[in-house]
Amino acid sequence: MAFFSGLKKIFSPARTAREESTGKIEPGEKVRGRPRVHVLATGGTIAGRLVSTGPRYRAGVLGVEALLDAVPALRGLADYSGEQVANIGSQDMDDDLWLKLARRVNELLDGQYTDGIVITHGTDTLEETACFLDLTVRTPKPVVLVGAIRPAGALGADGAVNLLDAVSVAANPGSAGRGVLVVMHGSLFEARDITKVSTSGFPAFAAPNSGPLGQLVDGRVYYGQRAGLSPKRPFFDVSRLDKLPPVGIVYGHSGVSDAPVKALVEAGCRGIVSAGVGSGNLHHDVLAALANASSRGVVVVRASRVPSGLTLRNMEVDDNRYGFVAAGMLNPQKARVLLQLVLTRTRKPEEVQRMFDGY
Ligand code: ASP
C-alpha cells in the first residue's frame, strides 16, 4: 500500500519569489511571524474528480498541491505546506493508517515549526478518524479535519471553501486547546459529537447532541461559548502500538438475529459495540448472546442507532448484571474507536465505563 510513501514528498522544496507571494512554505519555515499550517492529505471526495465512464466520480485522485493551488485565498490566512499521507476513499480507512496518522501529527506538533494541522479526508469515515486523533494526539495546537461531499468540477463543489475555512481555524490562536476539530459547510465541530447526517445534501455534518462550536463566514471563524474539555478526558499514547484490538459493531432492528454477535465472538473480537434500538435496547436473543460474550471476557458496549440522545446505564437493560458498558453520547462508530483504544489498557467493564464517562 502506498500509505505514507509520500511522507518525504513535501512540496515547495525551495523558497522562491513566487512562494513569497503565495504563502507556500517549506514545513518548519517561519515567515513574517505568520501562523504555519501543515496540510496532511489523505484523499476523499475533496480530492476527487469527475470521470466520464462508470461511477460519476473517483475519490482520492488529486494531490495535495492541486488542492492547495485551487484556493489562492489561503495565502491571506497563513504560511502553509502540504504532505500526501494517502490518497484513498475513506471507506478504505483502517487501523494502520490511523496509527501512522496519529504518530505523524504528534511528531509535527511536538516540534516547534508547525502551529496547526489540517487533515483533508473523505467524509464517509471522517468522524471516526477525528475521534481517533482526538484520543491519541496530545497538543493544545489546532488539528482540523475537513472534507467535501462534491468533487472538484461538480456544480457547487464545496472542497475549496471548506479547505479555506479549515486553514483559517488551524491558523487561529483561539482554536488552541479545544481538541480535534472538524470544519464542514460553514460550521465548526468538536470531534466527539460530529457525525455525517446526509449522504448527498448540505450541510452533510451535524453534532446532534452538542451543536456546532462555531461558525465560519468568509474564511473567518466565530466561536460560540463552550465549557472547556473534560479534565477526565482519556488520552492514549499509540506511539509504540502497531495494532489495535479487533472490535465489531452489531446493528439492531426488528426481528434481529443473534448470528452477527456469535460470528464476531467466533472471529476473535475483543469487544463488541451494539448499535441498539431506542436507548440502546436489545432483542432478547441478542441480549443473551451479548451476555454470553461478556461472560467470556468480550467487552460489550451499548450504543444506539438513533442519531441523537444519550445511551445511559441501566435504563431498560441491566448493565450491572451483564457487565455491559453504556456509550453515553458516542454513536456506535465512535464507541468502537474508543473501545479499541481502551482495550489496549483494560478489559474491566468498570474501568472501561469510567473512560467512556470521561470522554
Ligand atoms: N467515499 C468518499 C470518502 O469518504 C466520500 C466523501 O469523501 O464524501 O472518501
Image (cartoon, rainbow, N blue to C red):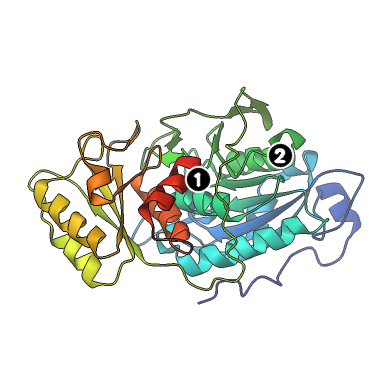
Residue type of the residue flagged with mark 1: Ala
Q: In this view, does 211 lie to the left or right of 303?
A: right
Closest to the observer, 251 or 341: 341
Q: Can residue 326 be seen in this view?
A: yes
Say which residue appears at 57% left-offset and 29% top-offset. 213
Determine whether label 1 and label 2 are within 8 Å by CB: no
User: Badge 1: few (under 14), some or many (20 or more) residues near its Cα, within 10 Å?
Assistant: many
Pointer 1 or 2: first along the chain = 1
Mark in front: 1 vs 2: 2
Task: Give the residue drawn at x 68%, y 59%.
Answer: 106
Disc 2 residue type (three-letter):
Ala
Q: Name the disc covering residue 148, or none.
A: 1
Measured as percent of width and height from the top left, residue 207 is found at 45, 33
Residue at mark 1 to residue at mark 2: CA–CA distance: 24 Å
Q: Residue at x 36, y 38 (%)?
A: 198
User: Which mark, by number, is residue 1?
Assistant: none
x and y percentages locating residue 63 in the rendered image: 61, 62
Q: Where is residue 130 in the image (x, y as percent from the top left)?
A: 52, 49
The residue where tag 2 is placed is 176
Q: Is 299 located above or below residue 318 in the figure?
A: below
> 335 or 306, which is in the foreground?
335
Q: Is mark 1 on a helix, strand or loop?
A: loop
Q: Quadrant of residue 236?
A: bottom right
User: Along the horizontal axis of the image, is 295 left or right of 245?
Assistant: left
Q: Residues within 10 Å of mark 2 (few under 14, many from 20)?
A: some
Q: Is residue 337 above or below residue 8?
A: above
The answer to whether the residue bearing label 1 lies less than 8 angstroms from the nearest atom of ligand 1 is yes
Outermost residue, top side: 225
